[in-house]
Structures are given as structure tokens and as C-alpha cells.
Image (tube, helix red, strand yellow):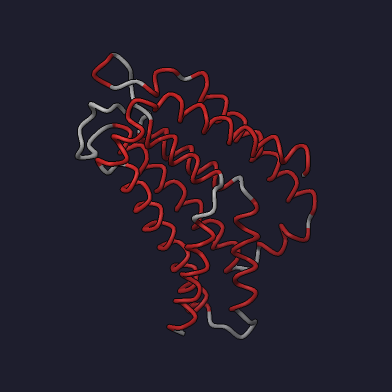
Amino acid sequence: MLETILTLFTVCFFARMSPGPDMMLLIKHSTAGSSSYAPEDGSTGSCRAAYACVLGVCVGLCFHVMLSVLGLAIIIKSNPMVFAALRYAGAIYLLYVGWRCFTDRDSVRLEGQGGVCTSARQGFREGLLCNLLNPKVTMFILSVFMQLVTPETALSERLAYGAVIVLEGLFGWAAFVYFLHTPFMKRLYGNHAGAINKVTGVVLFALGGAIFIWG
């Protein structure tokens, strides 16, 4: 079982590191309120919002994992209308968040300069909704479970696999956010937070639009 868990952890890690909505959101919240003169200890509001976004993503992961553990993900996969509804709802939300990257000017100012950083509550909410409304996450987890789980697999073992997926997401994304808040990265993007926010908005907008165009 240990070998299976290590394999599962590795597969999830590389899947997690491929660019997608969750990664773009974490970049958005990590750079919000950034400046080359911001504290280097990561104590800014953007840091709190980014970690809250990680927590929201992982709560969403728990939901997807439970669907697979209980076998409900198969219902979503076999019902085109439910799957399409989730995909389009997720696409609309990505378009909304992408648009916010262009219109929410305060989110790219330093708190001490009269602007406000994204709140932890908003970070959690966006991370949760972005993950929940992405049926591809359910399909990925289901495909992994179908390789590891049989009808005879004990519930405790299924839950252990699910816990590995969630914990990998928690620590993997937390490490990513920590990296974005290192002094080197803060100096690198410090004076370009506004541009990074707009690029992130373009990517999120493109991801949402692609779903409507190509399905």
C-alpha cells in the first residue's frame, strides 16, 4: 500500500503543477497588494489571502474525493447534462474572476498606499468555488481511483487514498505560495504586480472562454 500511496502522491503532484485555474488564482492572490517595498516576511494581506485560497481549494478537493470514494462521481460522468452544467458554471466563474483581475484596481496596490489587499475570506471563497465548479477535478480523481480501487477495496483504504490527494494538494499549493512570497520572488514581481494581475486575468478569461468554444 505504501508504494501505491507514493505513486499516487507523485501523479497528483505533477498534475497539480500543470498550469490551470487553481494555479492562476494562487498567483493572483499572491501578487495582490505586492510591491518591491512590501515586508519580506510574507506578512502582507496578499499572503493571508493566498493561503486562504489554498484552504478553499483543498476543501473543494475534499468534496471531489468524497464523490469518488462514494461512487457518486460515476453518476456525474455518465450524465452529460450534469457534467455540462458544471463545466459551464465553472467557465462563467472563471470569466468573472478574470474580469475582476482587470476591474479591481485596489487589489494590486500596497495596503499602506491607500489600496486594500484581497481579503482572506475572498481568497477562500474564490479557491473553493473555482475548484468545486471544475468537473475535470472530479474526473481526474475518479480516473485515479479506477486504477487503484476495486469493488472489494475497503472503505478505509479508499479514504486513505483520498487523504493523500487532499494532503498533497494542501502542502503542494502551500509550498507554491510560500515560494511566491520569498524575498527573491517578491523583488522579481514587486513592481509588476499590476501587469501580472492582468496577465492572470487573460489566462483565466481564456480558460473560461475555451470551455464555451471547444466544450
Q: Give the residue at the far top of this rendering.
A: 114
Q: Nearer the viewer, residue 175 or 131?
A: 175
Residue 147 at x, y percent in the picture = 63, 77
In the rendered view, does 212 fall on the left or right side of 145? Answer: right
| Residue at the image position 70 percent from the left and 34 percent from the top | 209
Q: Is residue 146 above or below residue 47?
A: below
Residue 86 at x, y percent in the picture = 68, 45
Q: Nearer the viewer, residue 31 or 146?
A: 31
Residue 3 at x, y percent in the picture = 46, 83
| Residue at the image position 65 percent from the left and 60 percent from the top | 139
| Residue at the image position 74 percent from the left and 49 percent from the top | 82
In the rendered view, does 173 fall on the left or right side of 212? Answer: left
- Quadrant in the picture for residue 108: top left
- Quadrant in the picture for residue 149: bottom right
The quadrant of the rendering that contains the C terminus is: top right
The number of discs equals 0
| Residue at the image position 50 percent from the left and 51 percent from the top | 60
Residue 102 at x, y percent in the picture = 52, 21
Q: Nearer the viewer, residue 18 or 192?
A: 192
In the rendered view, does 58 fall on the left or right side of 212? Answer: left
